Image (cartoon, helix red, strand yellow):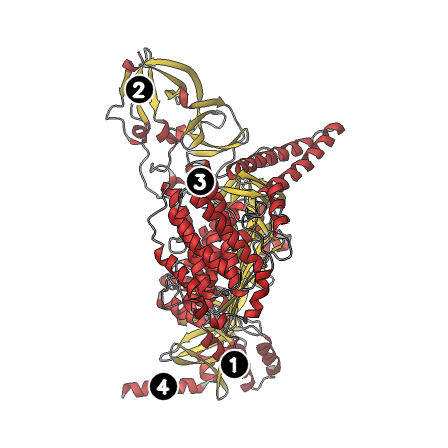
Amino acid sequence: MNDEHQYCTFYLCDLYFGLPVLNVQEVIRIQTMTRVPLAPPSVRGLINLRGQIVTALDLRRQLDLPDRLPDELPVNVVIQTDDGVVSLLVDEIGDVLSVSEHDFESSPPTLQGTARELILGAYKLPDRLLLILDTERTINLTNQSRGVGRQTDAHLLPDETESPRRPSGPQVRHDSPNRLRFL
Amino acid sequence: MNDVIREFLLETHENLAQLDTDLITLEKKPTERETLARVFRTLHSVKGTAGFIGLMKLQAVVHAAESLLSKLRIGEIVFNQRIATAMLGVVDAIRQVLAAIEADGSEGTGDYTVLIQQLDRLRETSGVVGVPETPPRAAAVPSTSSPTPSPLDPATSPSPPVASSPLSAVVASSSLVPPVSEQPATETPTELRGSAVADTTLRVDVGLLDKLMVLMGELVLTRNQIVQFSLSQENTAFLGTVQRFNLLTTELQTNVMKTRMQPIGNVWSKFPRVVRDLSVACGKQVRFEMDGQETELDKTIIEAIRDPLTHMIRNAVDHGIESPEVRVSAGKFPVGQLSLHAFHEGGKVIIEIVDDGGGIDPQRVREKAVRSKTVSAENAARMSDSELVNLVFLPGFSTTDKITHFSGRGVGMDIVRTNIEKIGGVVDINSRVGQGTTVRMMIPLTLAIIPVLTVTSGGERYCIPQVNLLELVRLEGEQATRGIESIHGTPVYRLRGNLLPVVYLDEQLRGDSNRAATGEINIVVLQADDRQFGLVVDAIHDTEEIVVKPLQKQLKGITAFAGATILGDGRVSLILDVVGLAQRTNVSGARVRVLDEKARGVSEATSSRQESLLLFRTTDGGRMAVPLAVVVRLEEFPRAALERVGNRDVVQYRGEILPLLEISRELHRLVRRRGRPVRERRVEQAATHSTDDTIQVVVYAGDTRHVGLRVGSILDIVEEDITARSDANRPGVLFTAVVQGRVTEFLDVDAMIRASAPELVVAKTAVATHSTE
C-alpha cells in the first residue's frame, strides 16, 4: 500500500493548500526582506537564510489573490527545488497531513487562469478541500505571462537596438487577472 | 583509465607547453644546449612511457624525433626553421594522441608516417639542406665534448611542472615556479630546480580549492557580521578577540586567494608558438617579447582571459604588423615588434598588447561603419578618432576586407570585450596610423571577493563594484538645486566642463522619489564600457568587501543587478550591474545619437502650438535661439577641416562647400556698420581662444544652399511658449525673450546673412534666376 501521501499544509486567503512534505525544508518567519526593484511582482524580496540568499515569492500574488493587509505577517515556507532553495510566503501554516490517493481528484476544466497552471488538483477531506500545488511550476516565473506588466513600462524596456548583447526585457502581456474560480 | 596512463597524460600535458617554448627558443638560439637537452629528455621520457603502455604510433613518431635530436645534440646538424617546424609537428602529434587517449583510450586514427619520413629526411639530408645555416664545424665541436646530462638520470628526467593542465593546479610559492619564459634556464642548474620544485609543491584538486574559496567567502561575511555586532558591545576581552579574528580572517583570505593564483605566464607560454606559426603563415617577420609573466591572477580569471588574449595576439600579427616589404617602404625595420606586458596597478592587473604595425585607420573604420550601416554617416562624421577606433568592438565589425584563416570575420573583438567585461575588466584600444596599436586590458585580481561601495536609494542599500567607480560628487545648498541641468528633460551635470549624463537610481528602480526634500545630491560617477555617467543616490556609505552571490533564476532577467550579497548587518543587498544599468538607461553609446533623435522627435511634434527652439551659446558666451524649423542639422567638424576661401571660412560638407559664419563676429560687424563702438578685438580673441579640436556648426537651411552658423556650443532643444519678450537692442536680433528662465536673444538669421554675407544671398538669387530660365 503506497497510496498515502504527506503534505505540508498552509492557508492563503482561506484556501487550504498543500505541498509535498519532502519538498519543504523548513518553515520560518523572517521579517527583514530586501526588496528587489524591477522584479516580477510575485518576488517580494530576498532573505538571508543562515548565510544563504533566498528569493521569497508571494504565493498570493502567484495565484492572483488579493494582497495581505500590511499588518498581516506572512510565514516563509522554504522549499527545496532543482533550482535551489526558494521561500514561499503564505498566510498561516497548518499541520502535516497524510492523505489517501483515493481522495484525489484533478482540477475541473472550469478552473482557469494561472491557478490552472499551478494547482494540480484537490484532496477531498471530510470538511474541506486540500489544494495541491505543482512545486516546480509554482516557483517558475519565466513560463508564466504574469504580472510583469505591472512594473514595466515602455521607456524602461531595454532598447533592443542599443543592447544587442543583453537579453531583451521581460515580455509584457496584458492579461486580465484571473481569480480562482473554484470553491 | 588506469593510473599509469592518467599519470602519463598529466605529466606529458605539462611538458608539452614547455616543449613548444623550448623549440622556439632553439629556433632563435640554435646553440642553446641546456634547452636542447631538456627537449631531448622530455621526448625521451615520452617515448619510454609510450612504449611501456603500448602506444606504438606515438613511440614511432617520438623515436624519429629523438633520432633527429641526437644528431643535433652531437652537433652534426644545427637547429633551423625547418627542423623547428617538424619538431613542432611532433608536439602536435603528441597532443593529438593524448587527446584521443583521453577521449576513448585509443591512440586515435592519425597517420604520422609523413611526419616520420620528414624527420628522417631532415636527419639524413641535413648535411645538404642545412649547409647555409651550419656554422663552421669548429664551432660545433666543443658541444660534443662537453657532457650533457644523461637522459636516463632519474634526478633530471621529470621536468618541473610549470604549465597548468585542465585537471590540476600546481600549488607552489611563486618564487619556486620558474616562469615560463624565453629565457632559458642557464642560470639555474636543471637538476637542482627539478628536485626543489618536486619537494615543495603538491598537486591539489581544483575542486577542493574552489570549495575552500566558497567557505572563505562565507567566513568573510560572517566576520563582517561579527565585527558589526561587536560595535554594540563593551566587553573588552570580546572586542579584543573580535579584532584578532578580524585580522586572522583577512590574512587567511589573502592566503586562500593565493592558492588560486597562477602566474599569467601559464597562459602566455603558448603565445610564442602562436606568433611564430602565424607570422610564418602570413609571411611576416615578428619579434615577440613578453614581460611580467610572473604577474599572478586568480585561476578563474586566467581561464577567462585566455581566449581574448589569444585572439588579440593573432589580430596583432595578422592585421597589425605589416609584411616586411610594406614596413621597409614605410621606413620601418622589416621585423615587426609585438610585445605583451603585464603588471599590477592600483589593485588591478594591466595587460598591454603593443605592436608597431600599421595601426587602425579611423577613416577606414568610418567608411566601413557607414557602409555596413553600423553607424549613420552623420554620426560617423561627428565621432572622434578614438571613438571610431573603439568601434572595432562592435559585434560583426571587421576592418579587414579579406577573411583569413586566422581572423577577419568580425566576431572576435566583440567577444574579446564581452569576455573581459564579464570578469569585471575593461578593454581599451589606442591606435596611431602607421605607428601601431596598443590594446590595454584592466583585469581585477579576483572575482570571488570584491570591494564595493554601499549606497542607499529608495530606502534600500545597494552595492556598486569599485571597479566601475570613478569618483563621488556631492552637491550641497545652491549647487543641489542648480547643479543638475537638463537637455530636453534629460538631466546632465557639468563635471569639469564636460556634460555628464545623470541617472537617478531611485527612478530607474522605481522606488520613492522624494529627493527634492533632501537638499543635497550625491552623484556616483561610474564608468560603463567607454562611457561615463553619474548615478544619483540618496546616500553614500562605506566601502565593504563582499562575496558576490548569483541571483536565483526568478531574478535572472533583471539586467540592473549583477548579484546579491549579505552585508555586515546581516541584511541582503543587491549588487548593481553598472554596465547593465547603463544599457537600460541608454547611457552607453547614446551620446552620438542624442541630438539627432531629439531634433527628429521635436520636429515631428511641430503641430503643437509651441515653437521648437534650438538654444545655443555663441563663441563669446551669448545665449541665443533660432527656430528649429530652419535648422537642417547640427554638426561637429574637426578644426582641421576648416578651409579658407577669400575672407570666409568654409568646410566641405556632403559634397558641397559650406560657408561658415561665426555668429558673434557677424553680429558685431553689423553693429559696426551702424557706426557704434566696436568690440571686434575682444570678439576675435574669444573666437580664437576656443582651442577645442572641434567646432560646432548649426547648418541653416537657405532656399537653395546651406549656410553653416558657427556657434560656441549647443545648449538644448526646447519647446516653449514665448511670452515675455522685448525688442531687440542690436541688429541681427529679432527680439529678446525668456527661455528656460534665462534671457535669450532670437537670431534673425536671414537678416544677418543678408547684411554680413551678401554674396551668399546673391549666389542664392543667381541660382534662383538660373533655375527659372
Closest to the camera, between mark 3 and mark 2, is: 3
Relative image position of residue A98 (x, y in whole percent)? 37, 13
Residue B666 bears which disc, if any? 1
Mark 2 residue element: strand
Closest to the camera, between mark 4 and mark 2, is: 2
The chain holding disc 2 is: A
Q: Looking at the picture, do discs 1 and 4 lie on one chain?
A: yes
The residue carrying pointer 1 sits among few (fewer than 14), some (14 to 19) or many (20 or more) residues within 10 Å by Cα, namely some
The residue carrying pointer 4 sits among few (fewer than 14), some (14 to 19) or many (20 or more) residues within 10 Å by Cα, namely some
Q: Is residue B511 visible?
A: no
Residue B559 bears which disc, if any? none
**Mark positioned earlier in the residue sequence (1 or 3):** 3
Q: Looking at the picture, do discs 1 and 2 lie on one chain?
A: no
Mark 4 residue element: helix
Where B354 sits versus B213, above or below?
A: below
| Mark 4 in CB contact with mark 3 (< 8 angstroms) | no
Residue type at mark 2: give it: Ala
Q: CA distance from mark 1 to mark 4?
A: 21 Å
Asked if residue B110 lies left or right of residue B34, the reply is left
Relative image position of residue B98 (x, y in whole percent)? 41, 46
Residue type at mark 3: give it: Ile
Asked if residue B705 lies left or right of residue B771, the reply is right
